[in-house]
Image (tube, helix red, strand yellow):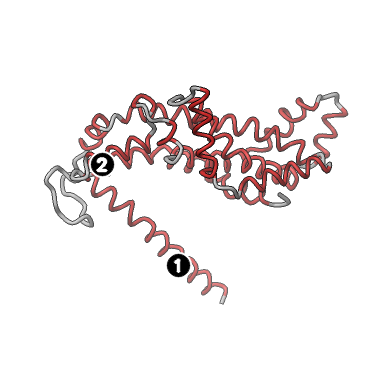
Amino acid sequence: MNKRKKIVLSAAALIIGLIHMVPFYILVTTALKAKGDFSSKWVFPDKPAFENFSEAWETANLSSAFYNTSIITVFSALLLIIFGSMAAYPLARRQTKLNKFIFMLFVAIMVIPPLTALVPLYQLVVDIGMMNTHEIAIFNNVAAYMPLAIFLYAGFIRSTIPKELEEAAKIDGASTLGIFFKVVFPLLKPVTASILIISCVYIWNDYQFAIFFLQAEEVKTITVALAGFFGENANRMNLVAAAAIMATLPMVILFLLLQKHFVKGLASGSVKG
């Protein structure tokens, strides 16, 4: 029965995986169709038009969009990792009433939709003159995903990293910062990979904040550029599909590089959170 159950579960997983791959297959076949090719989207073209990618890159001005999105994503992720891990460490190790209250406050913030603060946030950004800057996008993303980073880091530290390692380092004369950066932080690789994947995917694909705060042409991100490109080229779906594939590749590569740590870090970070 166990063997039969495994076969059934494997078959179900395969079917579900194939269903999820259907949109990507259609996206690829559409992106490779030549101009004027109106054949079925299910049929792979005989002569793939790879020039669609270069044309879409230039027409949609993706070089600028990739640069802006990369700057925002990389710096947001770095700030989340550095400050999220540093904030989570004392919350995980010092179980005072104040720390417990602060931790629960971060957890409570996680359930509040970020868009609820859009109106006062927009007015604040206009008043301080930070519209159409990379900095405001980075600050928004860090504020939006910091509670999640702290939640996962704190849970991982509590459930996975033994206190004896820190006590041994303290006996050897290491300072609190030295203990954190030399002993604790190197052991946070699995949960850091999870936070990187989750935050980078959401930040890379962010549209709701980018459309309000990054309206100038020179600071448009991938999602805003693609939305405008789709509106202008609704009758040239091959170019739109090619642009969409190029926009998704960085996050796909990131996930493939970090996938072995993703599930472990996410599961460990949720325990005792």
* Figure quadrant of residue 229: top left
Q: Please state the horizontal and vertical placement of residue 211, each as a whole percent of the image.
A: 40, 36
The residue lying at 57 percent from left, 34 percent from top is: 142
The number of discs equals 2
Q: Nearer the viewer, residue 46 or 87?
A: 87
260 on left or right of 32: right
Residue type at mark 1 is: Ala
Q: Nearer the viewer, mark 2 or mark 1?
A: 2
Q: Residue furthest top?
A: 129
Q: Residue furthest left?
A: 36
The residue lying at 32 percent from left, 31 percent from top is: 62
Task: Answer above or below: position of 6 versus 182.
Answer: below
Q: Which residue was labeled with disc 1?
A: 12
Q: Please state the horizontal and vertical placement of residue 155, each as a whole percent of the image.
A: 70, 46
Mark 1, secondary structure of its residue: helix
The alpha-carbon separation of the residues under discs 2 and 1 comes to 38 Å
Q: Residue furthest bottom?
A: 1
Mark 2, secondary structure of its residue: helix
* Figure quadrant of residue 12: bottom left
> Which tag, 2 or 1, sits closer to the chain's start?
1
The residue lying at 47 percent from left, 43 percent from top is: 256
Q: Please state the horizontal and vertical placement of residue 264, each as a whole percent of the image.
A: 62, 49
Disc 1 crowd, CA 10 A, few/some/many (<14, 14-19, 20+): few
Residue type at mark 2 is: Gly
Q: Which residue was labeled with disc 2?
A: 231
Disc 2 crowd, CA 10 A, few/some/many (<14, 14-19, 20+): few
Task: Answer above or below: position of 28 versus 175.
Answer: below
Q: Nearer the viewer, residue 31 or 106?
A: 106
State yes or no: discs 2 and 1 in contact (Cβ < 8 Å).
no
* Figure quadrant of residue 96: top right
Task: Answer above or below: position of 64 versus 241.
Answer: above
Q: Please state the horizontal and vertical placement of residue 39, each as a whole percent of the image.
A: 15, 54
